Image: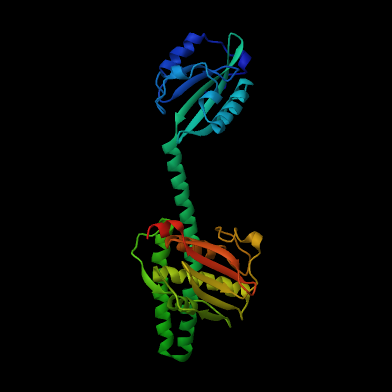
Amino acid sequence: MGDSGSPSDRISPPEGGYQALVDNFPNGVLVLVDSGLRYRIVGPDILPFSGRETTEMVGKDVFELFPESTASRLASALEATLDGTAQSFDVEFEAKVHHIETEPVRIDGDPYSVLVTQDVTEARETANTLAEQNERLDQFASMISHDLRGPLNVAEGRLALFRETDDPEHLAAVEDALERIDELTADLTELARSSGSDEEYERVSLDTVARSAWEMIDTLEATLVTEGCSVVGGESQLQALFENLFRNAVGHGGSDVTVRVGPLESGFYVEDTGVGIPPERRDEVFEHGFTTGYSGTGTGLTIVRRIAASHGFDVTLGESAEGGARFEFRASEESLDGE
């Protein structure tokens, strides 16, 4: 409905003309609202979204017809329209999203709002799905470049050593690193496609997984200490989780940091003796792109949270006894209910 001038400049059609338009309005609902925010004309006779009869609505104001939050949003827009400003907005009502367009008119000199509404629930859900997919693709690109750096650096370093020494052990390490790159590519692709995983998990030793992860990063003079514990999960994905946590610990905690992995009643923890993360920033660290420096890209802990979620774990960040970071992974209520 385009703007054809100020309300006073518009031709004031007879009310009967609006009734005819309402009765024959395609693909939606057309309403005429007066200055008391009362519905004067509503059509078609049976509303397509809710199945309500229009006779139940005529003469009632928006606060009689809708929940408080919906009515308040409508009232604000309708008041602006009655003052001469057209509106365009969405409201939620009865589990549906309705897009509403309003236009000011005058009938016999009195202000009214013509209101057109259409159900856009499916369109909005489609748009949200596409936005989520685009976000996952963006994160996937960051994840791939981030997590492949570790094994790639190992392969390049060991290949250089082989060229210097001709020691075949270095080629074996290169082969292991290349296999790890292949595993990461498959795992991160799956994680980027959805927030969960459909694969069948098995019980794995976190001691073994943690030590495999330790070998894939530059740990400098840092120390890894593990206690015996195991969880049900995907070994390769859990290794990626540890690699990111260890890289984070060494990057922030320094070359001589100690990292510990141990069991919890319904999960496990990873903590270090580094400088820790201030309480006011602990909710931010899992956001994609958030970084506190040391050449980090703000991707590692996003990967950690996503892998944890795919295994049914909630992750929280606290403080170790030495003041370092402590990540706790506990089975979520949903996963416990499903056992």
On the image, which quarter does residue 166 sit in? bottom left
48 with respect to 146 (left or right): left
Q: x, y (%) of residue 109?
A: 61, 10
Q: Quadrant of the C terminus?
A: bottom left
Q: Is residue 300 above or below residue 56?
A: below
What residue is at 42 percent from the left and 80 percent from the top?
174
238 with respect to 272 (left or right): left
215 with respect to 271 (left or right): left
> Is residue 149 among the parts visible in the rendering?
no
**Which of 149 and 230 lies nearest the eye of the viewer?**
230
**Which of 313 and 107 lies nearest the eye of the viewer?**
313
Q: x, y (%) of residue 141?
A: 48, 60
Q: x, y (%) of residue 325?
A: 60, 69
What residue is at 55 percent from the left and 67 percent from the top?
327
On the image, which quarter does residue 10 sit in? top right
**Which of 321 and 276 lies nearest the eye of the viewer?**
321
